[in-house]
Amino acid sequence: MTVTPGTPALHSLTFRLSYADTDPAGILYYGAWFPWMERMQSEWFYLNGLRQDQLLERHGFWSVTCHTECDYLVPVGLFDEIRIELRLGRVGGGSFDMVHQMVRTEDEVVVARALITLVTVSSDGSATPIPDVLREHLDRWAGASAAS
Amino acid sequence: MTVTPGTPALHSLTFRLSYADTDPAGILYYGAWFPWMERMQSEWFYLNGLRQDQLLERHGFWSVTCHTECDYLVPVGLFDEIRIELRLGRVGGGSFDMVHQMVRTEDEVVVARALITLVTVSSDGSATPIPDVLREHLDRWAGASAAS
Amino acid sequence: MTVTPGTPALHSLTFRLSYADTDPAGILYYGAWFPWMERMQSEWFYLNGLRQDQLLERHGFWSVTCHTECDYLVPVGLFDEIRIELRLGRVGGGSFDMVHQMVRTEDEVVVARALITLVTVSSDGSATPIPDVLREHLDRWAGASAAS
Amino acid sequence: MTVTPGTPALHSLTFRLSYADTDPAGILYYGAWFPWMERMQSEWFYLNGLRQDQLLERHGFWSVTCHTECDYLVPVGLFDEIRIELRLGRVGGGSFDMVHQMVRTEDEVVVARALITLVTVSSDGSATPIPDVLREHLDRWAGASAAS
């Protein structure tokens, strides 16, 4: 995960951990970050006109998540307030990484980092180079980080 | 993920994908595997007398998930029946990997693979070598796989 | 909820409560039953050829949940094994109730009861009498209960 | 559900519906409201010093959800922005209702209404009249609504 910590986030979502996010010890359980990442990242694509459920019909391609990983750095617990930040990571010819950083707002400590790798596929499901319409967004998102 | 595919699973759970597991295209969304992994793996530890919420009190240590990763190999969709299989992966001095394999039961195709790394910690939260009580279980679980 | 307790269930699903289902005290939290009900009831309709996401296309109608309610009778906790049972409840001209009963398998105690009311709607979203294809299923399901 | 629509909410939470909240038709599925209600209501009690997981230790009582119900008034779908509002409903001798109202922010239409009934219990799990520390909060919350 090669994102420079200081670069501004593309998008973020702030929420408080609740019962459904934590185990009986009141500690976040490892699966809890993923629905939040999905929610925030889907909203980012939606706000950029890249609504996942309409990509194929409107642009003739589709994106598929092929890999996720997450490092749990600091334990967090019930009622901690968290900000999930989204940044663009590595961009390749037919895939790209979205990097998620979980920050405890009380002290701005990064408590977890995750990476989601997406590949672009054509209507028949086979891998396809990143189409121009998406490439333009990725270039702009990369610029947003580089400029900081 | 170094598990030999042919080794028998330690534990498994079979279920059918439903609306909560899938996106509007009816395709499983990437976060959906994690609650199933958590559910099945927690049950395995529970059935082995290693109930996570009583480890500290009963045995003076605790296990913490420090890393997860998942590879999505084949798209699966609404109402597909899936069997999640649990195996032991790498075992180190103070950490070990549990390997999860998601199999579509209709044709026995492996549709996803995931890995969960746990570290053992003492009551003050600092890393500690894997305690004997847990080591004995891991040795037996490794034997179960090696013997196949 | 007028279902006679002794009637056989149309369908059921057995599972063990895990971290995601319980609060920090290890007690089931009230929202946890609903995903299980959805999962089991959707499977039942699917197994009867009434796949919810294809109803409109195949049969020209759609069903919509307009009301849910749940009574929590006995506290249950982490690692309790539960069987959710599905029965048909009241059937009206344009709506019907599916009744869910949550049973702790260890002692067969009913720990919760829930009811889901569905209405049938036509393609324009307006209420429509229960179509024949569905009415035949409901009659058969009612017979299954009455015959017990 | 006897709450006057015009009374101000005690607490609220705004979010956008995402894949996990919706079915393959992109319509909210009936279970999706409950985790949001739990999250928001738990935060409200937490912000009022009534942290659910510490009630017993600090105040000698506990609250248990004994009933929930929800009416689905207007279909909502993927990416709709929703505001959940919390109000106090009926207060009895040993129980009280929290009323949740789901509002689509785009046009301020109430799309769903739900009610959660809680009973107060003592440390042995038996029903107990609402203790003073909680009664004072309920009186203030009732006043907040009545004063509007």
Image (cartoon, coloured by chain):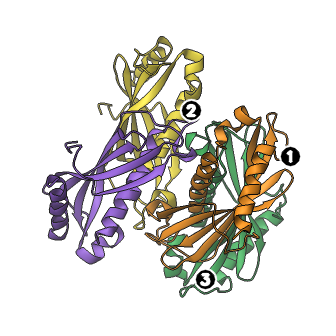
Chain colours: A orange, B green, C yellow, D purple
Residue identified by numbered label 1: A129
Q: Distance of mark 1 from mark 3, alpha carbons?
A: 45 Å
Q: Are marks 2 and 1 in contact (CB under 8 Å)?
A: no
Residue identified by numbered label 2: D25
Q: Distance of mark 2 from mark 1, alpha carbons?
A: 29 Å
Please name whichever residue, A21 or C99, is drawn nearer the observer in this view of the structure: A21
Residue at 38% across / 52% down in the picture? D37
Q: Amino acid at mark 2?
A: Ala
The count of marks equals 3
* Residue B36 x %, y %: 61, 54
Q: Amino acid at mark 1?
A: Pro
Identify the secondary structure beneath mark 1. loop
* Residue C34 x %, y %: 44, 45
Mark 1: few, some, or many residues within 10 Å (few <14, many ≥20)? Answer: some
Q: Quadrant of residue A97?
A: bottom right
Is residue B80 something that shows in the picture?
yes
Name the quarter where the N terminus of chain B is drawn.
Answer: bottom right
Whether labels 2 and 1 share one chain: no
Horizontal side of residue D63 vs D148, given as left or right: right
Identify the secondary structure beneath mark 2. loop
Is residue B109 something that shows in the picture?
no
Residue depth check, mark 2 versus mark 1: number of the one nearer the observer: 1
Residue at 30% across / 53% down in the picture? D86
Residue identified by numbered label 3: B121
